[in-house]
Structure formats: C-alpha cells, structure tokens
Image (cartoon, coloured by chain):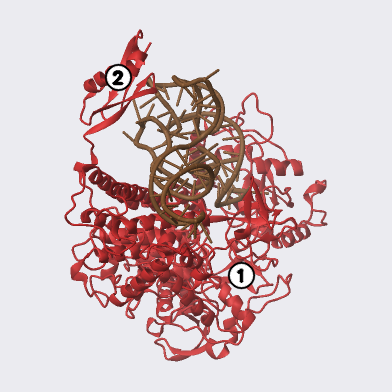
Amino acid sequence: MSQTADLPHGADQAGDVPPHRYTPALAQQIELSWQDRWEDEGTFHTPNPTGRLSAGFERVADRPKFFAMDMFPYPSGAGLHVGHPLGYLGTDVTSRFRRMDGDNVLHPMGYDAFGLPAEQFAVQTGQHPRVTTEANIAAISTQLRRLGVDHDQRRTFATIDPGYYKWTQWIFLQIFGAWFDEDANRARPIEELVAELDSGSREPAAGTNPSGRPWAELDQREKNGVVDAHRLAYLNEAPVNWCPGLGTVLSNEEVTADGRSERGNFPVFRRPLKQWMMRITSYADRLLADLDRLDWSDSLKQMQRNWIGRSTGAKVRFACGSEAIEVFTTRPDTLFGATYVVLAPEHPLVGALTADVWPDGTDPRWTGGAATPAEAVREYQRQASRRSELDRQDAGRDKTGVWLGVTATNPVNGRELPVFIADYVLTGYGTGAIMAVPGEDTRDFDFAGAFGLPVVRTVQPPADFEGGAYTGAGPMINSSNGEISLDGLDKAEAIARITAWLVERGAGEATTTYKLRDWLFSRQRYWGEPFPIVYDEHDRPVAVPTSMLPVLLPEVDDYSPKTFADDDADSAPEPPLSRATEWTTVTLDLGDGPKEYRRETNTMPNWAGSCWYYLRYLDPGDDERMVDPELERYWMGPRSVGDTGGVDLYVGGVEHAVLHLLYARFWHKVLHDLGHVSSEEPFRRLVNQGYISAYAYTDERGFYVPAAEVVERDGQFLHDGKPVDREYGKIGKSLKNMVTPDEMIGAYGADTFRVYEMSTGPLEQSRPWETKAVVGSQRLLQRIWRVVVDEQTGAVRSADDVEPAEPTLRALHQAIDGVRDGYTTLRFNIAIARITELTNHLTQAYGASSPVPRAVAEQLVLLVAPLAPHLGEELWSRLGGEGSVAWAPFPTADPRWLVEDTVQVAVQVNGKVRSQVMVPADADAAALEAAARADEKIAAHLDGATVRRVIAVPGRLVNFVVA
RNA sequence: GCGGGAGUGGUGUAACGGCAGCCACGCCAGACUUAGGAUCUGGUGCCUUCGGGCGUGCGGGUUCGAAUCCCGCCUCCCGCACCA
C-alpha cells in the first residue's frame, strides 16, 4: 500500500512517535500479514455436513448453523467507493460475532456478472464481455480481500461461469416442465397434467384450448398446444416495450415516464411480440400471504404488497349486440351509477364491436373528427401505440377517447350506455374494460366532463360536499330496480347484495385481480444465459435434455442486436445470437431419431442468475445437481413447524425491494413445489442497509469542483477562495466527491475504515460520509492497542498477577452486555460506543504504563475482534491466545457485575427532577421515599406542601406529587 | 393523490413510558513539546440576575411522569401512482 507516503494527513508523519504505536503503517503491515495467514490456513472455510466441503465438520457439528449473505455485486469497471462496503461489513461483523459465539457460520460472496454494461463495453471495443467482466471481478475481489472480510473463498463463483448457468438453465427447464394446479395452489410436473387430461379427471384450463373440442378428440399438435399453454414458462404474443433504437424489448422498469428507453433515451413502442413469459401471477396469493411469515421490514413488505396489488371486486357483463363486455370493478355497489363503458384501445373486442357509421346527431366530441367509427378507432389506436404504458399512466393528462358508435346494456337497469375506447383504461389490468361511474370516480368524472356524459350519484355525499366525484362513504341512493334495492345500505353491504344478485342473474361474479403481471423473460441481447430450448419443424419449443446442459453461449462477431431507426415501430427484434448461424441450427436425437432443430436466440434477463445464487453457495462445485438436498436442509431448512426456512440474514440495498426479491421468491416456491428445496422462502430475514451519501460542490458555472478541496469558513463553502454551492447525494467520479476504500485503507488501515463505517449509525440507516471524522476511529484503535502493548518497548503490558478492581469489572461486564446487544441487533454503533467506554475506563484506571489485568485485556480484544479483525488477531496472538481469534469464544457478561451495590436515584417533585439520592440497589419503595424525604433540597420543596401521592420505582426514581 | 418512514446540540447519533443528549466528530482550554496535524487531561444544548429557567418540528391529549403512546397540523425522505 504505497498510498501512505502520498497522503498529507498520514498520522505517522511526525518525527517522534513512539516506536511501537499503532500507526497506519503498522496497521497495514498487520492486516496484510493476517490476510495471508487466513488464506493459507483456511480460517474461514465453512464445513458442510456432507460432501466435498465437509472436511472439519466434526468440530462444528454440535453448533447451530447461521447463513449470512450479501446481495452480490455487479462487477462494474468503476470499482467500489466507500458506500459499497457498508452492507458487506455489516454481514462480516455479524458472521464473525456469530462464529465466535458458537455458530457454524456460512458467509459467502459471488458476482452477478451477466448484464448490459459489459455488453455495451464489448460493443464499443470489440472485446469479449467475458474478458472485461473477469478483470473487473478480479479487481473487486482484491478490494474485498483488503477489507478483511471472512468470505469462504472456495464457494465464490460468478453467474457467467458455465458450471453455474448450467443450473440456471436447468431451473428454467423445471419451470418450463411444470404447470400450476389452481386447486392444489401449487406447481406440479407437466406429465401429471397430461396424465390427468388423458384420464379425463381434469379439463384443460380456461383459455388453453382454442378449438373448444374435448381433449380426447384433439390431435397431437392441438394437445401439445393445450399443454404448452399451461406451462409456467410459456411463449406468448403479448404487448411489450419494443425499442427499435436499441434493438431490444425492455421491461416496464427500463422505460422512462416520457416513453423512452432509460438507457440511450430512444423512443419505445408498445406492440405485440412473441416472448418468453413466466407465470408469476399464479403465485400472487402465496407471494402476498407468505410476506407475513418473513422477518423483513414493514416498509419492504408493503412495497411488495403494493406491487402485487391484490384487489377484490366483481366482474360484470354488459351485453353489446351479440357480444358481452366484461368489466372489472371494485365498486359493484355503484353499478346503478354507470353512465358509459370504456375499453382499452387494444381490447380484443374493439374490432367486432365498432359500428359502421355514426348515428345521426352524434356529438362531434365523440368522433375524434373521423368520418366513420372504424376510422376513428384506427387513428386512436395508432396514437395509443406510440405511447408507452408509463406515459399513458400520467394521471395529469386530459382524458381522450372515441366512441365505437354502439351501446351496451347495464344489467341492473337496462340502460343503454355508450361504449368508448380511451387510453386511461389499461389493457393489462382487470379485464381491460370498465364501467364508468362519474359520480363516484374522479377519472370517470373528468372524462364525462370532457365528453358531455351524464353523472348519476349513487352514494349520498355530505352536505358540505363541493361537487365533482364523491369517493367517500355514505348511504346508497338511486340504486334500485324491480328486484333489488341498495338504497340506504353502506358500501360493504351493498357490494355483497349486488354481487349475489349478479351471480343469480348470470351477469357477473366476485373476483380478485392483481397489478402483478406475468414476467417477460426474454431479451434480445448477447451477454446473458442462452435458453435451453430448441424449436422443432412446427415451431414448437422443446426442452434441451439435461444431459446436454449447459447450452454454451456461442462466439459472435458482433455483440449488439440489430438496431433500427428510432421511430421504426414495425421493425422486429433480431438478437445477436440469431447471427451465430453455425450455432442456431442443431441436430438432436430427442428420442425419435436425429432431427434438425433451431435454437432459441433470445437470452435470459439479468435477474435470472440472481434468482437462486444463494443455493449454489452451498456447493458451487457440484456438477451432478443444482444443490444437494441434504445441504439445503442443513443451511436453509425450516427450524420449526410454520417456519419458512431460508437464509438467516440477507443484506442489500432497497433498490431490489421488489423485482429481485419477488423473482427469487417465485423461483424458490416453484423449486419447493417440485420437491427440490425444503424451504418455502429464500430469505427468512432481510435487512436493507442504508446508503452512504456525500456532499458535492458546484462553482458559479455549475461545474463540480473536487469536494476534498472545499473549505468551510463562517458558514460559507469556498473552493480556491470562491464560494461554491453545496448539494447532498450520491458519491461518484463525475460529482468529484468520490472516496474509495483503498484511499481510506491507505491512510488509516482497513480496521479503522471498518470501525468508522460501522460507527456512524445502525446498519439500516443512511448516513453522510465524512472523511475528517475517520480519525476518531483510529484513535479508538490506538487506545485499545495501548491497553495491551507498551508503545515504547513493544512489550505486552498486561499482567497475570493483577486483579481487576470492582469498578473495572463492572465496566467490563457492562461493556460485554452492551456490545453483545449491539452486534445482535445490527446496531454496531452501540457496540462501538460500549467498547469505547471500556477502553476509556481502562486508559484512565491504568494510565499509560501500569499493567492491565490480562483477563480484562483479553476480553477487550475479543469484544473488538469482529469489528477490527486484524487488530484482534494481532493482540490476541501477542497476549498468547490459542489459534485464530476468529474462533475464540465471545465473552459472556456475568450478571453479578451488571448490578451496582448502590445506585443514584432521581427525585422528582411534580415530575421535575429536584435532587439525586444514593440508595442501596435493592432498596424498596418505602426506603426510597424515606431517603428522598431526608434529602435537604427535597425537604425544602415539600415544606408546607401537601404530598398527595408518591411514586417510587426501585432503582429508578421517586416522584412526589404535591398540591 | 395513495401507502410507508423520519424530524433530538454546530455534525453523526444515544436514551425497557422514568435524570434528554451515551459514544464520537468539531470546537475551547490545559499538559507534554522546538513544533502539533500526534498523544494525554478537562470543558462544551440554549438562556441566566447563578436562585434557577427553557429545551427532542408545531398544537392538543393520555399519564404521577412523554423524545417515546394517542389525535390534528407542518416539513423532509422513500415507494406507488389514470390499477377501475
């Protein structure tokens, strides 16, 4: 680490530091030497109960297991800044503490290495993404090692390793080979579906059998179609975000609010394309319900609940000519107030319903200026396709739409309601059609206003209601026909009554819908997992046999998909793999003789590799199976009846609150249903670490200036003598406020850096970075060093023949108690505060040179070892400790020393503290009161007053309530 | 708009409903010093007539007692947002 010499503030620059002071230079020397020893001795090799990684299991066999994990990094070329290690250090301190405290701890790390940045770089440079990715992995791995983390290096892998993505492909085939049994509410192998269809014990699910003929009468190709339509991974012609400028489809999350690609800022179009989908919606209920069984933060659970977006209501059918329009509503109670019907522009019935001509006297606002309804519809649909889904969801936009020239019949009162298409109705939610109730819905009210449609109120608004749509509570009005009346009922009762009535009449039924959509699983990219799928001569997708996995990513000349003109909405995707013509065509014998097949040329999305990596840590070298079931039971299995099982502590950023965590939970549940894992959830406990932010400064031209050169004077921030503006936010090179762990390690050592990061707040909390405060952590470690080592001679100060005095024992055991609490609850700042108190006590009690009792010094070293592991090892070894401190037992507080003999108790008069008295710790209420009354100041306060009540809490306080 | 969370010294933070501000940074003073950017010691919420008074975003409430619980505001952060 050559940085030391270059840094102006190196603490070891002064001339006369004692020769054996814990300086940054010494810290680095110690750190590098222990990091080598850990590697040489395999200190952090975690034994499995069985298999190739089981050596040494006997020494941990009686321990409980603890599986701690970080969200693995994407190895970008930018390297780590000081914000990145926060979570990694949190799991590291925790895993070191748990190991010392008697757990068999698994703390692995890997790399999420498929993805766009590497592919973009490859497109620009022509260099294979694997080359740059592996170089980045090597760089980050070096940075992590230098932090002193206790990862089991034997378990490290990257998602791009063929030995890993072989099993990603295998899992895809499991999902492809499964269907969701709605009755059993779980996935089952597809062969069981075929058997049940053949035996007649099951009918094809709704929508899976286009011909409508009985299963037994279908030919083989029709049967194949029915079966394929049941699969959990399926091909579907669905509206997707097509970005011609990038040549790829994008997920909704990759499209900006103004309908452009997040990357590159190209226009994005909604259009139907055949894509791989995953039926995550089948799991919506279980994904929602099982949140209650997880130890995750409420806010995170709430984000997942919102994303799943379950809402209950009713489907209602409105007759329209020979067709029926099915709408979804959460307010069937307001059905009498429906005054028109709206379909999404892409609704499949639009074509069939559209009238030939406008009736006489059609309101010009309804026609969109077109001569015929068909023309109006065509033009409106064309406009809508140019808008992305997100763009259409801009609630502030004025309502637009056109009339189809027809009406539909309201089943409750026979009223004929005009049928519109409008883009404020979304095709993917509910049934893609609504009944519009302007009296009780704000959006419908806006549309009705713009189109001159009537408003009928069915909920009585309060007297002071100012108009518009009334969405509050109130008794039903205007809601009766010859058979049923809702008038006077409240919302819940009205919903129950009208739903029952609709069911009776065959006009509707209660239903539940979700915002969650099926997962678009294919991408037109190079740097991803190839699908283990080939197509036969009928274009039917067929699984590549497991024995032929992995399907290796082929070499190509050009890593980019074919791109098109920005606005060429009708272009079609051509993935990079489609140009690897030697690869795309393959001859296989799938049991019916050698035949020619065509390979799938899409690749999987970046999420695939991160959906199951936690399982692979259990034995990444296993070439026979995804994971040994025995290992999965040991590390992940449920601990008790009702426990979901899963990783014991998963730490990562809140940016993955929804997608990664939802996708991983979904895959895990499929694997559970198919019998591959015993756990029901992947992550039993999850913590979102906070972010580290920093100040950035801009000069009068708005350019960033180096934050390190800015000085504060009289509340003003100056760079080069000129005032600059300060903003608070991200750390980054372009913001000129980048601080790297390497710089900090160079200036102070890894242990100081670790202690500083952990000292600034609870793990979950975001906090600012402040380089000038790091020195406080260094001072602490220097004082701890001084407790053990004589700075002048280098000799160990502590002595066997010195007995600790009582105050020292109390300070020690109170510290042990507090530090344990801090480590257990991930409030490392608390642990550090208690360690500091103990250190300060020892410094004062024993001065700079008198010997510290060995037992106390040892315990102090053990307390700090999880936070500052190199210092811990060094002092432990100098004190003559056996083996690595990483495996030494963590101290336990003796309750005897946690209680004082005498305690100071506050005495209040009317809730205000007026004095303090010393009393025996076990003094009862009467003794407390007597001691308080004997106090001069209190006596003065009570003199002449009437004491109406006395509250005495032993060990805490006395409160006199006086008149 | 809906949902979630948070407001405590100059700063990061700490306080089972029981003495507000532990521990740090910064700042002030002192010691050791040629020197201090090292180290050590002490001080540091605000006001004060030195008795004390006031203090946890604002206003109410519950309680003997509220930073903590309840109600209503204000501000900030995060998520969702034409989801019928």
Task: Pinpoint residue A715: horizontal percent, then vertical percent.
Answer: 64, 45
Using the rendered image of the protein, determine whether residue A101 is visible from the camera's viewpoint: yes
In the rendering, what colour is chain B? Answer: brown
Local SS, label 2: loop
Q: In this view, does A706 lie above or below A316?
A: below
User: Horizontal placement of A938 versus A564: left or right?
Assistant: left
Report which colour depicts chain A.
red
* Amino acid type at mark 1: Val
Q: Which residue is labeled 2 in the image?
A: A935
A62 horizontally vs A253: left or right: left
What number of labels is visible? 2
Q: Where is residue A525 in the image (x, y as percent from the top left)?
A: 57, 76
Q: Residue at x 65, y 28 (%)?
A: A465
Quadrant hosting residue A624: bottom left
Foreground residue among A512 and B52: B52
The answer for which chain carries disc 2 is A
Asked whether A924 or A383 is in front, the reply is A924
Q: Can you tell which of label 1 and label 2 is closer to the viewer?
A: 2
Q: Distance between the residues labelled 1 and 2?
A: 80 Å
Estimate the x, y position of residue A198 in percent, counting from the top left: 37, 71
- Furthest-top residue in this view: A944
Q: Earlier in the sequence, mark 1 or mark 2?
A: 1
Foreground residue among A786 and A365: A786
Q: Identify the amino acid type marked 2.
A: Asp
Residue A32, compared with residue A871, is above or below; it is: below
Q: Which image quarter is the C terminus of chain A in?
A: top left
